Amino acid sequence: VRGSGVNQTKAAVYIYDGYIPFSTVLGKFLTCALAIGSGQSLGPEDPSLQFGAGIASALGRRLHLSREKVRLIAPVGAAAGLAAAFNAPISATLFVIEEVIGNWSAAVLGAIILAAVSSVMVLRLFLTEQPFFSVPPFHLIHPIELLSYAPLGVLGGVASLAFINVVVYLRVGSKAMPQWTHYIQPAAAGLMVGIIGIWMPQVMGAGYDIVDQALHDQFTWKLLALLAVFKILATSISFSSGTPGGMFAPTLFIGAMLGGAVGGVEHIFFPHLGGTVGGFALVGMGVLFAGFLRVPMTSVFMVLELSGNYSIILPVLI
């Protein structure tokens, strides 16, 4: 049950013929609730992918499907779990194809789409049909404004690289420590994140409420930049310790803070720039999602589904 669950799901599909013990689903559910609920800097989306894959794997075995069909049904369940967590069926479908399966397999594409859409329909029966975030109106006044998003893309790439390097460095260091320490590393990480949270409480937990505030331009660019840096640090500490939880939410958080900071600085030097700081924050979410998770197609549709705004596609592509 360690980590995000994405790599474990890929291993189940490619190495273990789709076999995921149902005890993993139960354990992941409990430990993720404890970790994220207590303030660890992680999110629920990636674990939800593993929940879905585990339930599908158990169902396939219960129905006595062949090994090949059990292997194929795990990504179908993964798409259902991720779609419900994100309220975004298209993004979930694309992510599972891009990252979990790795190719456009006609054998499972229809089933993945059906599972993702069905999952979101059930979610919306109980919750809401509204987009994940309340996003202010976004309009492009002149095509030249698109160029203002290019620096955000470059900085997003640099931030993604820095984020990856910090995570890898800390993860390698934590795994090299004595075996007995692995049982207390999540607690130690929680203590460190809590200390950071004394000064920067916004970085604790998934942070969706803070992202929503950034989208509505409620922070200065300096605070946004600080939140991006400290979120990278807090998330790297949480994830490298083996704490169960996902990287989707922190990646969106960091991207929103970075995008808002870039937008704030550009508006200082170019006060007549048409795009809002909130618009830059929204684009930044897609930028870092594409850079850190290496799923550019998913990132475009993810921002579209989360915001419900079609005009955001061009800046995200830039």
Image: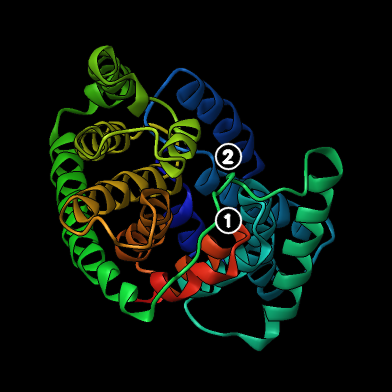
Q: Position of residue 20 (x, y in %)?
A: 60, 51
Q: Is residue 34 left or right of residue 266?
A: right
Render colour scheme: rainbow
Image vertical order of residue 276 relative to residue 39, above or below: below
Residue type highlighted by circle 1: Ser
Q: Is residue 170 left or right of residue 42?
A: left
Residue pointed to by mark 1: 307
- Per the rendering, the mark at residue 278 is none
Q: Secondary structure at mark 2?
A: helix
Front: mark 2 or 1? 1
Q: Residue at x 16, y 39 (%)?
A: 170
Residue pointed to by mark 2: 24
Q: Secondary structure at mark 1?
A: helix
Q: Residue at x 56, y 64 (%)?
A: 304
Q: Position of residue 146 (x, y in %)?
A: 33, 75
Q: CA distance from mark 2 to mark 1?
A: 33 Å
Q: Position of residue 306 (x, y in %)?
A: 58, 55
Name of the residue lying farthest toward the front: 272
